[in-house]
Each structure stands twice: as C-alpha cells, then as structure tokens.
Amino acid sequence: MRTKQEYIEGLSKMKRNIYHNGQLIDRTDELQMDCLNTIGTTYDEAAKPENQDLCTAISHLTGERINRFNHIHQNKDDLHKKQDMTRMLCQKSAGASSAAWGSTNERDLQCSYEADKVNSGATKYHENFKKWLIRFQTEDLIGCCAQTDVKGDRMLRPADQPNPGAYVRIKERLKDGIIVDGCKVHISEASVADEILVLPPGPCDRGQRLRGGFRRSGRLEGLKQVVTIHNLRRGSITNGIRSGATDSYLISTTALSLGKGIFGRRTSAWRCLCTPFCLFHRHSYSGCKPAIGDVILGMAALAAEVNNIHKQSHVREKLAELIMTIELGYAADTRHPISVNRRSTYRFRFCTLRPRSFIPNSIYCNVGRCSRRAVWREAEILCDLAGGVVATFPTRGTSKSGHRRSAPQIHQAESEHVG
Amino acid sequence: MRTKQEYIEGLSKMKRNIYHNGQLIDRTDELQMDCLNTIGTTYDEAAKPENQDLCTAISHLTGERINRFNHIHQNKDDLHKKQDMTRMLCQKSAGASSAAWGSTNERDLQCSYEADKVNSGATKYHENFKKWLIRFQTEDLIGCCAQTDVKGDRMLRPADQPNPGAYVRIKERLKDGIIVDGCKVHISEASVADEILVLPPGPCDRGQRLRGGFRRSGRLEGLKQVVTIHNLRRGSITNGIRSGATDSYLISTTALSLGKGIFGRRTSAWRCLCTPFCLFHRHSYSGCKPAIGDVILGMAALAAEVNNIHKQSHVREKLAELIMTIELGYAADTRHPISVNRRSTYRFRFCTLRPRSFIPNSIYCNVGRCSRRAVWREAEILCDLAGGVVATFPTRGTSKSGHRRSAPQIHQAESEHVG
Amino acid sequence: MRTKQEYIEGLSKMKRNIYHNGQLIDRTDELQMDCLNTIGTTYDEAAKPENQDLCTAISHLTGERINRFNHIHQNKDDLHKKQDMTRMLCQKSAGASSAAWGSTNERDLQCSYEADKVNSGATKYHENFKKWLIRFQTEDLIGCCAQTDVKGDRMLRPADQPNPGAYVRIKERLKDGIIVDGCKVHISEASVADEILVLPPGPCDRGQRLRGGFRRSGRLEGLKQVVTIHNLRRGSITNGIRSGATDSYLISTTALSLGKGIFGRRTSAWRCLCTPFCLFHRHSYSGCKPAIGDVILGMAALAAEVNNIHKQSHVREKLAELIMTIELGYAADTRHPISVNRRSTYRFRFCTLRPRSFIPNSIYCNVGRCSRRAVWREAEILCDLAGGVVATFPTRGTSKSGHRRSAPQIHQAESEHVG
Amino acid sequence: MRTKQEYIEGLSKMKRNIYHNGQLIDRTDELQMDCLNTIGTTYDEAAKPENQDLCTAISHLTGERINRFNHIHQNKDDLHKKQDMTRMLCQKSAGASSAAWGSTNERDLQCSYEADKVNSGATKYHENFKKWLIRFQTEDLIGCCAQTDVKGDRMLRPADQPNPGAYVRIKERLKDGIIVDGCKVHISEASVADEILVLPPGPCDRGQRLRGGFRRSGRLEGLKQVVTIHNLRRGSITNGIRSGATDSYLISTTALSLGKGIFGRRTSAWRCLCTPFCLFHRHSYSGCKPAIGDVILGMAALAAEVNNIHKQSHVREKLAELIMTIELGYAADTRHPISVNRRSTYRFRFCTLRPRSFIPNSIYCNVGRCSRRAVWREAEILCDLAGGVVATFPTRGTSKSGHRRSAPQIHQAESEHVG
C-alpha cells in the first residue's frame, strides 16, 4: 500500500494534459494541492493501525491487505464498513471531497463485469479485468469513473446528435483496440486520478452507440482535461486538512485504447457496467452525504452557539431536522443487501465475479440518494441559524483580480439582510 | 438631477474610510466599479425621456422634478410606480443590485418621521428633516439605511451585552449633538452611498438604548467601513451593464453627529422610524425580488432551451412554479395601501408628513416578503434545468491566487453530477 | 331581488331528478337543507342595508339593483367588491360552501360571450344571451357551471373514448336545438341551482367535439343528478348557519336543448366561454379560499389558546404561515385587471359585451389559485396545533348505520397520537 | 396460542364499561367488529404454518412458542422480524389498523422494566413482572398502552393543573395498592384490548407526579372508556378483511389497582418505562407506516392506471416519491440496534431483563418516525392522481341520520374540482 507521498509522486510523472484557465498545468500544481491533500488523506488514514479494520481489507484475489476502496465486497459487513469509512473520511476533510469517494468506488464496480459470458467464451475480458484489478489493488491506485456525456440535445439519441462529440463514440476499430472520440463532463477528481474508466452512454441516454469501453491512462494521445478547481475558502483548515475538489471536462479527439485496456465491447455487457456504477455510487453517497450533513450540522450548531440561541426550541427543531435528513440517508444504505450468487431480481443480466460478492440493494441505495434532495433545505437552515454573515463575511474576497459571487450566494445574502 | 458621472465624481471627493482586504481604498476603486455601474444605471434610466413617468416624480415640497427614489408617495399610483420602476431597474442589472434598491428607499421612509409631536413643539426635528429632504432631492443623492446591529449574544438586550459595540449607542451627549459608538453589519451599498442613515436598535432587538439617530457623512471622524464586494462573474455582461453589489461592516468608534444632522432622540419617535423602514424595504422587495425571479426564470428557460427540454411537461411545470412565486410576491405589494391621513390601524403612533402621503399596507408588504423564502427552491429549479454545468463551468476560476467555492456551491455540484 | 324563502320555494317546484343513495329526493329534502341554508345566506345578506354596497350592484342592462353575483363587472372596483363579498360570505358560512361561490359566478362569465361575431351576424346569440341575462338578473337566480367531464381514458381525445359518454357531446341536431348526451362530474351545488350552464369539453381536453352549449332546466328530459352531500358535523353551527355543500354527478342521456337556450354552437365561440369560466372561477377563489383559510386560522388559533400555547414562538410562526398563504392568495386577485375594450393580450379571440366590462388578469388569477396548493400544509398546521383530538373526537360518530373515516383522517389520527 | 374466536369470546366476558355515542355497548358490539376483525387477523395469520417464523417466536421465559407480539427480542433478527410481521399484517388489513400494532408492542416494552434495582431489593417488581409476562404470553393476550394524558394547560406542570384530572395521578395509597384518578385520551384499540398498561405522565410532561403505574383490567371499578370508532367506508373489503380501528378516551375516577398489578411506583423506574415505550412504538411505526404507505401507493398506482396516466413521467415521479418516503421509514428501523448487555449510551438508567435482550437504536427509530411527517404529502399525491372522485364519490353518504365531512375532506374536494 502506498503513502500519500508516493501517490503524489506517481501523478507528477504522468503526461501533462490538464488545462486550467487556458494554461497547461502539472497534476501537482499548487492549484491542485488542496484536492491532493484530500485524496491523500485516504492513504494517511489507511496507514494508521487504529483504522486497519475500517480502511483496509484482504483481497479475495491475492490474499494481501489492500485499501478498502479497492476491495470487492465479500459480505454484508464489507458494505457497512465501506459506508462507515466513507463517512469518517468525509467528515475529516470537512465534506469538501465528497465527490472523491464517489469516484473511487469505480474500483468496486468492476465486480459486476463479465462480458465474456455474452461472447460465449470467445473473449478474455474477465481475465483481462482480473489482471487489471490485481494490479490496481497492488499498486494501490486511485480511479475515477467518467460517466456523464455532454449530451447536447436531450431529445435526440446519441447517434442523432448534430455534434457527434456530444456522446463518446468509437471512431475507428483497430485490430487490437479502438479509437474513441467525444467529450465527458463533470468528472470529479479526474485530474488527480491514476486511471479513468470511461463508460459508454448509458441506458437512460436512450440508446447505446459505443459498444466498448476503455481505460484511459496519461499516455494516451489526444485526451485533454479542462479542470475546474473547487477549493475551500483560503484559511479554512479542518482537522489539519486543507480540502479541495476538482471537476474535469474531458475532451478526447483521438484517444487510443489498446486491447488489453478494454474490458468489453458488447452493449449487453456494458449495460452491466453502467447500472452497478450508479448502485455503488449511491452506496458511497450513503457515507459521504451524511458526512457533509454532519459538517453542516456542526457549522449550524456552532453558529447557533455563537449567537447563543442553541437552546431555543425552534433552533433545536431545525438541528433535529438536519439530523433526520442525515441519518435517514445513512440508514438506507445496506438494508437487504444482495449476494450476487443467488438469483437476483435485477432486470439487467447480472454477472458474478465469484461467489460471495455482495452488492447494495438498489431500492435502498436509491431512496437513500433521494433523501439528499434536501441539500437546499440544509443550506437554508444553516443560513437561518448563522445569519447574513454567511454571505457578507468581509474577509472572503482576496484579490483585485476579482472573483465573484454566484447567484445562490447573492440570494442567500438577500434573504438574510433585513427581512 | 445628476448624471451617473456626477454621482461618481461626488463619491470620489468623500473622505477615504473604506477598507477592503485590509487596504484603504477609494470609493471609486476599480473593485467598486461594478456596483457603481449598477447604481449609476438609476441615473441613466431616469434621464431617458421614455422613463420620465416611471423613474421621476414631482416633489411635493419643491414642485421640482426629482428621481422617484427620493419622492414621498402622494397616492396609490406612486406606490405602484415605485414598485414597477424597481422591477425594471433590477431586471436591467441582472438582479445583482437588488439590495441597492432596498437601501435607497431609505429616502422614502423619512416620510414617517415627525418626532416633534412627541416633544410638544420643543424641538424642530420636522423642520430639520424637511430641509434635509429638500437638499437630498435637489442634490439627487443616494442614501442607505444602516439597520442591522452586530447583536452579539442574541439572548441579551443591547444594554446587557458584554461587548458594548454589539449595538450602536450614544456614548456622549454634547450640547449640539451626540457621539455614537458601535458597529452595524450587512449594510448593503453603504460604500457607494452619499449618506447613511443610522438607525438605533429596533423594537425587535428587545429594547432601545440609543435614543437618537444620526446621519453619517464622509466628513465624520472615526467611522470605518469594511466592505465585501460581490461582483458577478467576470465576463457576465447583461443589458450592457456589468453589475455588482457591496455589503459594509460599519465600525464607528467616535462618530460625531452635530445637531443639525439629528432627526430625533426620543424612543417613541425612533420607533416610528424603524418600523416604516421595514415597511418600505419590503415594499421595495415586491419590485426587486420579482426582478431577481425574472432573471432566474430567464436563465432557467434559456438552459431548458439549450438542452431542448423546454417543451417537456415537467419542465413547464417548474417554470410555472417560478412564475407563481415571482408574481405572488409582486401582486402582494400595494393591496389596501394606507393613506396616512386617516386613522390608521398601525399600533405605532404614526406621524404624518402632510396630507395624502401613502404607505404600503404592512400585512401585504410582509406576506409578499415571506413569499421570498422560496429562494432556495428557485435555485433548486435552476440547477435541475441547467444541470451540473452551473457548478462545474470550467472558465469560472480565473487566477491562481485562488478563489474558492462555498458550501452551497459544492452541494449544488454534488446534487447534479451523477444521481 | 328574492328572499331565501322564495329561492327555496322556487327549487321545490322543479322537476325531481336528484338521486341520493339510490333514492329520488326533492331538492328541498332535509338532506339538502344545510346547503340550501348556505346558498340562502347570499339572499339574506344581500337584503341587509349595511351590505348593499358590497352585495348588490346596478345592472348595466336594466338599471335595476341586482345581486352582485349576477352583475357584469363595470370597473376594477366591481372586481374587488366581488372578491370581498365572497370572502365575507364564506367566512359567515364557516367555509363549508366555498364551492358555491365558485359556481355562482358562472353568472359573471356570460360577459365573455358573443359568438355572433364568428357567425358574421347570421345568428342572434348575443341577443339571446342578453335576454337570458336580464331574466336571470330580474328573477335573481342561482346558476352553476357544469365544466368537468368524466374524461375516461386521459390519453385519448373526447372523440376517441371507448365510452362515448365520457365527454358530453351533441347526439343529434334538431332544427331548433340539439340533443346532448354524456356525463359531467363534481358539479358543485348543481342540486340546489336554478339553472346549469353546461360547457363543452375545453381546450385542455385535447380537442372540442361539442360545438354548442346549452342551458339545462329542470324541465329537460333525461337529465339525472346523482348527488353527494357534504354537511358539516351535526351540531356545528357557525354564525347561526348550519352549513353544507353538494356535488353532483350529472347523467344526461337525452337532454334536449331548444334553440332559445343555446348561446353558441361554434368551437371558436365556445373557446371564449371555457377560458373565462376558469378566469372567473379563479377570481372567486381569491375570495372564497382566503375565507376558508380564515376559518382554519381561527380554528388553529382557538385550539392554540385552549392548549395555552398561543404565545409560544413556534406556534406564532405557524399562525403567521397560515396568514401568509391566505393573504397571498387574496392579494393576487385583481392586480392589473383588464378592460375588455382595449386590445387584450389574451390569446383567445375575446369578445366584448359592451364597453367598460372588466375581467381579472389571467396571470394573477392563476398564481392566486396556485397558492391554494397549500391546503395540505394548512391541515397539517391545524392538526399540529389542535392535537389528536381533531381525529379522535369521541362524539363524532353517531349511528350504527355506520359511516366511515377516510384515509386522510386516519392518517391524521396516526400522526398525532403518540409520536 | 389462541384463535381469533377465543380472543373475541374473551372480550365478551369483560365488564361493560365502553360508551359510544352516549350508550353503554358490549366490547363485541357490531360497531366494533371491523376493529375486532383487524386485531383478529393477527391470530389468524400467526396460526398459518407459512407464517410461523415471521409471526411467532420461542419465549425465553418458558421455551414455549408464542405470538411474536408478546416476545422479548433476543437478537437483531427478532427486531427485523417484528418489523416485517407488522408491515405484512398492516398491508393485509389495508392500513386501517396501524394503531393496533403500535399498541400491542406494549408487550415488548416490559423488557425494560426492573424497578427493583432502584429499591435495593426491597420490592419484588421484577418477579411480579415476569409472572405477569408469562401469563400474558401463555394466555396470548392483546395489550395496549395508555400514554397520552389529557394535559389541560400545556404551560403548566401536571401538579399545577386547575383540573386535577388532566393528568392521571395517585389519589390514595392503600396498603396493598393505589387508587388512581384522571383521564387518558387517544388510546388506540383500548376498547378491544385484554389489558391496558397505564403509564404515568412522562418526562416530556415537565415532571412526574404519579409515582406508580398500574394494569387495568375490566374488573376495576370506576374506569370508563368513551370510544371513537373508525371503520373504513362500508363496502371496502381488502384481502377479505373489513378493517377498522378505535380510539378511547379513558376516564378513571376511582380505578383501584391492587399490589400484584403494580410494577413499580418509583419515579426513576417509571422513567425506564416511558422512554422505551416510545422506542418500541417507533420501531413498530417502521413496519406499520410503510404498510400504510404501501396501501396508498397501491391506490395511487391503481387510480393512475384507471385514468391511463400511469406511464406519464410526472406520474411515475410521484409514485417514486411515495416509494422514497415508504422505504426510508422502513430502512431506518434497526440500524445499529443495541444489546442491553453492553454499556448503553441511553441517558436513562436502563435496566436489563436478562442478557441478550435487544432494543432498537433511538436515533434511527426517531428519524424513521419523522419521515412519517410526509403523510400530508402522500394524501396530496393520492388526490392528484385519483382526481376529485376521492372527495365526491357519490355512494359514500348513506343515511339521513347524517354524517358529515371533515375540513380536510372538503379541502381535498376543493383542490381538485376545477382548478
């Protein structure tokens, strides 16, 4: 298992293809440091003896101890621990890096992959995948999953878009691979990941055109990332961590993916991939979103104490409402988890990696996710209790080069000033 | 009536007491230009012949044409026009300057002032005020109203605060004036106003200690403003206007207010001042908040068109919901306005300036204001229709010096990425 | 103008075609008395000298004093008075009869009718209508408007329904009239009205098949009403009135409408009729719904007082929320009313009765109506403040013949018992 | 274990003290039959071989098979099964009897009782309780828990009430028991229960005055029940069950409780009783409330199908919202259950019956309960999808003796008619 330092060094050796504000930057540019700190925390915490049970696991493939993020769930308890680890880590980094944990569980989702069945044994995708997974576990990598296509005209299917790059697509098939074209957007932590798994357009995108998938690496030609960097307000240090997050807009014009990086090119197999990604992503939400809620709850409670209103009944009622939202989302995670051995009720052909792999129940994953629609209500409560200072804090703006407030912030200021 | 240019020149001559990011800056510093543009628009528009009826009025004191913002409502129609002017101006400046209109109608509120009655003729407050108002109208000034005290421990009355500056207070009474001490916070557009009317703590602050009030001018010693500057994202130009807004934290240690600037020092008279400020501020909300809603509605509709989902029934339902919120707040403005001649039902002793002055009805002002609690829902709808790009737009960040996203923005990003 | 007694006597002479619980009943059956009392109140109140201005008006057709419900709005003030009269009457009858006022303003809607324009003078519809209206005003009748068709399969247009009675339709055209077939449902107060105006399916029903309309009278053959009677709990007497309401399911198999009862048979003309019915119905809502809100508010405040919690801040906040909903709906009524003389922006060809007829603005009518979606929240607040007794009041159930609680009531009980 | 028939026969032998509509009635009066059917279903289902695992358990006291409702949870699985049994039974009886399951788990709560510790061995309460529980399990009884006091003036403590009956209290202490006085209200299913456990006023009632508790039986003098009967609409038969529910208002003027029926008279011990009652009641909610949601969901889906709108996206979204509420409440039940062996974090002194008794986690019980605040939203969705027929169904009203609609029903009718 790597250290945070080894992780950052690994990134520094990757090909430069990250653009920020029109400039090509290093992955380890100062601008990215807050996000690197955040991801780095997962290495620091996993190395602590007291976190061994929570943050690491024994690989069912190699028998070695690995980071739990790279583990294939072997039982219900693994699902619970993944959730609890996520909540703990997101609390530590002040909620800023929540997206990170969502993206990393791309590692988990591989469990669902087995396209060979579809090909009646003509392909070696499953073996390819297991080799890839073993390397991933051993090298202790950070992955991210590129799911969201730019989408263009939402009323048209991928193949009918006037701009063909609106969805990723196979531009050319080579003997030993594919050339892929198109854009992905809102890809959290792509700029600090070791590998990106690019998914084809999903079933909800009204049709699949890309009948394959590929793993990006920094070596591939023609892939650019335009990165948006979201760091917390300078000076905000929580638990010793300066937290941050990034989103990337991936532009691929001639991304070449060689055969060994391809896990499947059949639609039916890919369908297996998209749905469980959502499943695991939502399972991760059941850990990271409650943690964000915990941070908001803590801020709201602190603000109430500063104003000395924390004992007033209407304040307690609002804090209780925050707790309700947080814990409902947490509780929903692993009710009735499903062992992929037994006949599952999922309507997609579900593919087992090996006996005793466990996946979350899709109903509970999804209702837990839905409970997060309360984000606006949470922000409203926080502003109610903290007052206008949330919007008008005078030391925020720092440079003449001028950053600007977004509409929601202005709104918030308005709603608090006077009325 | 002044031009925008004359307004800005006027500010440039004021004493420098504005601090930003630890630096003393000019009122006409580049950082403040977006906000100056926004306020300046009120001069530009008032000068256009086609806006004469909407944006100007005839002073009942001098018979001269003045900016409607400085006018004392003479009839119901004046109330309607004030509202419609406010909505038009806020639409023009993309909603960014909404707070400005709220603060400027401080000019209106003077109509309620007449403390002399309380003093049985011993004072000349009313005459003082009329002189002041005539000058204000003639010089075509921008005022703002400093209402919100820092407040400290919310469970203690002003006089019981451990930090005496938590509420403004009279530190010393001179023969011809008072020396005032304490802080105000969240004072919108104070840094670009010609005059500030400082209110004493209001009835809702559980007691009044300051039995007087005073008008600040740049000449007064010992008053500092720490300003927060909220400009729209660089590059966002709406209707030819680069919009912005500011909030000030006013720190007064030895503000001296000479007698001629004082309009009243009796509690009962001050009570007259605080309540109508809220009344008129909320009346302004009935114009500026619908305008912000209009801007959000326009953005949401545009985003829906870009995604080609604008004809889908669930999208139309959301746009209709925005319209409902906007127009309910607008409709509530001047139902049953009150002529201050006739016996009013207000529980405060209400003081007439002269016959035929009209004030908004407090019930409808307040319910219109309450409808604005929907700001969070509006932001949610906008994000629903626009998608994650609201949060992850890659060209936002501009400098390495690093601006940072606030929690609501992160939330918003999260809620849109994948789920 | 009639008395309540004359109104009831008039009903007693009508042909018996009302069915309740499988039995043919008189219009003046004891079961209908609470509803008759409620409608009767409109006669009692109009006869009081102190209500003359509010509840009566001068007919622009005859110059005689008439009930305001039968008046064609001549100015903005008429719209306001109609609203205020409605609110007063609904408060008096404890909100029970709100639907009644909605239906009676069918009388208003006639103002929109003038199909002759469409027919280039070939028909006398407008003259027919004026004669009918004069008689209606002079005889001081109660009308109701049958709008809602049964609708059947909501995805099919009227003409495509497997059950042809799902929408009313013209079965046969006679030389001097039409034979109409089909069902209407949820027709408030039809069982206590003197006349029913049957509308054809509206534009929102995806196509009009019925190209005419007709006025029902008790003499027509083949029309049956199956009535549902909603009386308040026995023993509940408010302001001396035992209130009630009814809904009818109208079944017409061979309703014959002679020419003189027909106001128009052209689609384009009918479109004029449907839309303003909604317009005026929603205008009525702006009076009757706030009145229902007033009753709920009064009950909630009374319950809070009984429990001695009315001074607690969270209780006051809930009462304030009720006020907000009530007054927003009230305020929205007549903002920017439209004189039908001037070029209107309505997208339907709008037809003037005569100069200076005024109609409500459709945007504000509709947003006012939308604010009534808060009914569930109002019920929730009432239950919160009153406690479980709302659901478990022991003297409610009275007879072994066994009436039963609906699901919402049980819910309410549940939500209050313990938790 | 008893049969439904034996249960009903048992009730028929109890002393007559149930009043309905001013009349003394038998417990097996026709009016109560729907509720008896509902409770009876718990006997019928427990007797089915296929339900043995779900609906019965092995007593840890006697080793005999007993109804699961009377079982003391021995492990986490018992908690899950109790929840699933409750959901199944409430689905079967169309949700009508939800309150019943809440009341029956009073049996569970006894597990928390052990006042002897407080008395340093001077009393035999624990032995008394075990004897009572063994009898309860063996005779297969139905219990209910009388918790809610009438409460009177909510701002006064029990001892300060002008009406001493507002809270139950000990009127007199006898050598071998107590005489109790006062009223309880909203006691679900008290009129069909074999025994009632009367709780003293709880900690949230701002003080305990009653330092004891007692078990009611039909033999006690001076206890009267005034019952409200809530049966479903006549003709509504679900799964072969005519369902109903009752609430009782208990009036005790001289209820005598002999020593052997008393489980504890010390405040500190009673505190143990009140809190876990809520805990278990809320745990029951996590089964019965989702079942009510299931019934509403089924009705809403059926209504949508009848209207042929079930495939429309806005309808599917509403059905999904129902599912979210239902399953979040269900999921929250037994996250982190607590074994009462280990040091618990409950702030009340918690008393173990014996090792391996399991109780639900109070946070998750409570947030699951809170999710039920959505009842109003559920009713709104149901009415949206079903339309006005929910309110105007013509065959509902049945007799001239006149039952009446409640305000929520009228509201519902209004909101659906036209707008």
Image (cartoon, coloured by chain):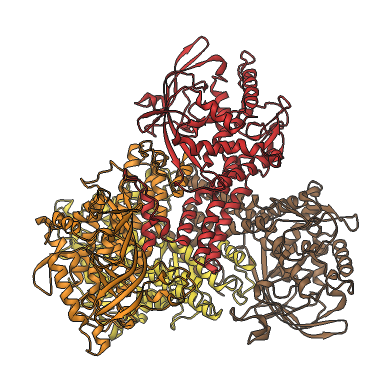
Chain colours: A orange, B red, C brown, D yellow
- Is residue B291 visible in the rendered structure shown here? yes
D242 or B393: which is nearer to us? Answer: B393
Count the marks. 0
- Is residue D135 visible in the rendered structure shown here? no
Left/right of residue C21 with respect to residue C377 in the rendered view: right
Horizontal and vertical percent for residue B52? 70, 38
> In the displayed structure, would residue B333 be above or below residue D48?
above
> In the displayed structure, would residue B23 be above or below residue D272?
above
Left/right of residue C227 with respect to residue D347 in the rendered view: right
**Screen quadrant of the N terminus of chain D:** bottom left
Q: Residue furthest top?
A: B175
Dividing the picture into quarters, in which one does residue C236 lie? bottom right
Horizontal and vertical percent for residue D43? 33, 79
Horizontal and vertical percent for residue B165? 39, 25
Left/right of residue A263 with respect to residue D219 in the rendered view: left
Left/right of residue C232 with respect to residue C69 in the rendered view: left
Horizontal and vertical percent for residue C327? 61, 49
D54 or C252: which is nearer to us? Answer: C252
D219 or A371: which is nearer to us? Answer: A371
> In the displayed structure, would residue D171 be above or below residue A132?
above
> In the displayed structure, would residue B346 be above or below residue D174?
above
Dividing the picture into quarters, in which one does residue A69 lie? bottom left
**Screen quadrant of the C terminus of chain D:** bottom right
A255 or D364: which is nearer to us? Answer: A255
